[in-house]
Image (spheres, rainbow, N blue to C red):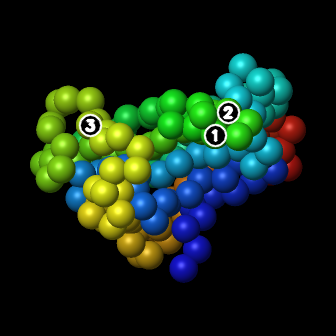
Amino acid sequence: MSRVVYEDRWFQVLAPERPLNDRDDGGHLILIKTEPVTDRSDLSAEEAIDFMRISMAVGRAMYDVLGIERMNYEDLGNWGIDEPGGAKMHLHFMGRAKTQVHQVRGQHIALFPKGHPIYDGHLNPLDAAQVEALRARVTEILSEPKYATMAAHAGLAS
């Protein structure tokens, strides 16, 4: 099964097989730059517009498909700071369900340290049907006039 929810010239949105947030708590997606940069300030103007366009569409799709109560956008990178080449810019989408299983409603997402056993299969990833529904909804959202205008400003063919 493909874990790719969306992909274009500069970015890819993935549903990780080892999520940081269980699907029952609202799910987890990651937006990555296909040619990594250290920080969002390293993006070109066109890439920055596309980054915002994608993050808006994916967040909305998570509301629509997963029925989440709240969307958290998390620009992290600390775990990669000591990796070769340092940390790479990416954005985490953490849905927050009205009823939390592993998290505490109304509180910031709790993350265990890198390498903690909780990430070895304890947290459930989005399933194939959810990934496909998100893929279809993101495509649909991106065809709306607001997003088409943003794509044009980003230099992306419509």
Q: Secondary structure at mark 3?
A: loop
Residue at the image position 30 percent from the left and 42 percent from the top: 112
Q: Position of residue 98 (x, y in %)?
A: 16, 45
Q: Are marks 2 and 1 in contact (CB under 8 Å)?
A: yes
Crowding around mark 2 (Cα neighbors within 10 Å: few <14, some 14 to 19, many 20+) is some
Query: 87 above or below 93?
Result: above
For label 1, the residue is 83
| Residue type for callout 3 | Ala
Q: Which mark is residue 86?
A: 2
| Residue type for callout 2 | Gly
Image side of residue 142 versus residue 15, left or right: right
Q: Position of residue 141 (x, y in %)?
A: 56, 51
Q: Position of residue 66 (x, y in %)?
A: 33, 57
Residue nearer the viewer, 34 or 87 = 87
Residue at the image position 47 percent from the left and 51 percent from the top: 29
Crowding around mark 3 (Cα neighbors within 10 Å: few <14, some 14 to 19, many 20+) is few
Q: Secondary structure at mark 1?
A: loop
Identity of the residue furthest to the top in this view: 41
Residue nearer the viewer, 82 or 92 = 82
Residue at the image position 26 percent from the left and 30 percent from the top: 108
For label 3, the residue is 110
Image side of residue 101 versus residue 2, left or right: left
Sequence-earlier tag: 1 or 3 = 1
User: Real-space Cα distance between discs 1 and 3?
Assistant: 23 Å
Query: 11 above or below 111?
Result: below
